[in-house]
Image (tube, helix red, strand yellow):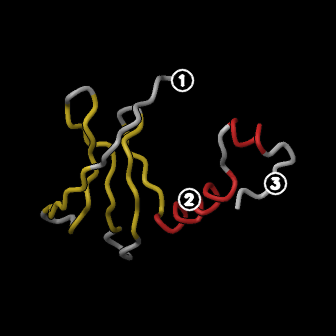
Amino acid sequence: MEASSCVKEIKATWAALHGEGMRLELSCEIEGQERYFASFLADEADDTLFFEMAVSGSSVRVPVAQLESLIADAKREVHSESWYDKNPAGGDDA
């Protein structure tokens, strides 16, 4: 797996593309260069909101509703190794 970049700030830019409606493009600075990595856009057929990300030179679209559900799960269940060291029984961190 390639090394990942942790960024401190994500830049959000509104873009109105002719024939594609409004989208919110996300970018960040990596090694001194601003790089686009994802956007939010709506499906033309039914206005479903999608999160589109760049993956290995291709675009992958995920429904925002599903992504919100997965983020909620991650907030409850994803922890660092040090958290597990402090909570060996997998206890609630609240």
- Which residue is the extreme one toward the front? 86
Given residues 19 and 12, the one toward you in this image is 12
* Residue at which label 3 appears: 91
Q: Could you classify mark 2 by the number of other residues whose Cα lies within 10 Å: few (under 14), some (14-19), or many (20 or more)?
A: few
The type of residue carrying mark 2 is Ile
Q: Position of residue 12 (x, y in %)?
A: 24, 55
Query: At x 84% / y 42%, what residue is drawn?
Result: 88
* Helix, strand or loop status at disc 2: helix
For marks 1 and 2 on the same chain, the one whose residue lies earlier in the sequence: 1
The type of residue carrying mark 3 is Gly
Query: At x 36% / y 41%, what residue is drawn?
Result: 54
> Horizontally, is 53 left or right of 30 in the view?
right
- Which residue is the extreme one toward the bottom? 46
For marks 3 and 2 on the same chain, the one whose residue lies earlier in the sequence: 2
Q: Could you classify mark 1 by the number of other residues whose Cα lies within 10 Å: few (under 14), some (14-19), or many (20 or more)?
A: few
Q: Position of residue 7 (x, y in %)?
A: 36, 39
Quarter of image, res 83 = top right
- Which residue is the extreme one toward the left? 18
* 1 vs 2, front mark: 2
Query: At x 33% / y 49%, what residue is drawn?
Result: 38
Please state, as top left, top right, bottom left or bottom right, where the N terminus lies in the image. top right
> Horizontally, is 10 left or right of 69 in the view?
left
Which numbered marker is on residue 71?
2
Q: Does residue 49 lie above or below 59 as drawn?
A: below
Alpha carbon of mark 1 to alpha carbon of mark 3: how far? 30 Å
> Horizontally, is 41 left or right of 85 in the view?
left
Q: Position of residue 34 (x, y in %)?
A: 20, 37
* Residue at which label 1 appears: 1
Q: Does residue 35 lie above or below 15 as drawn?
A: above
Please state, as top left, top right, bottom left or bottom right, where the C terminus lies in the image. bottom right
* Helix, strand or loop status at disc 1: loop
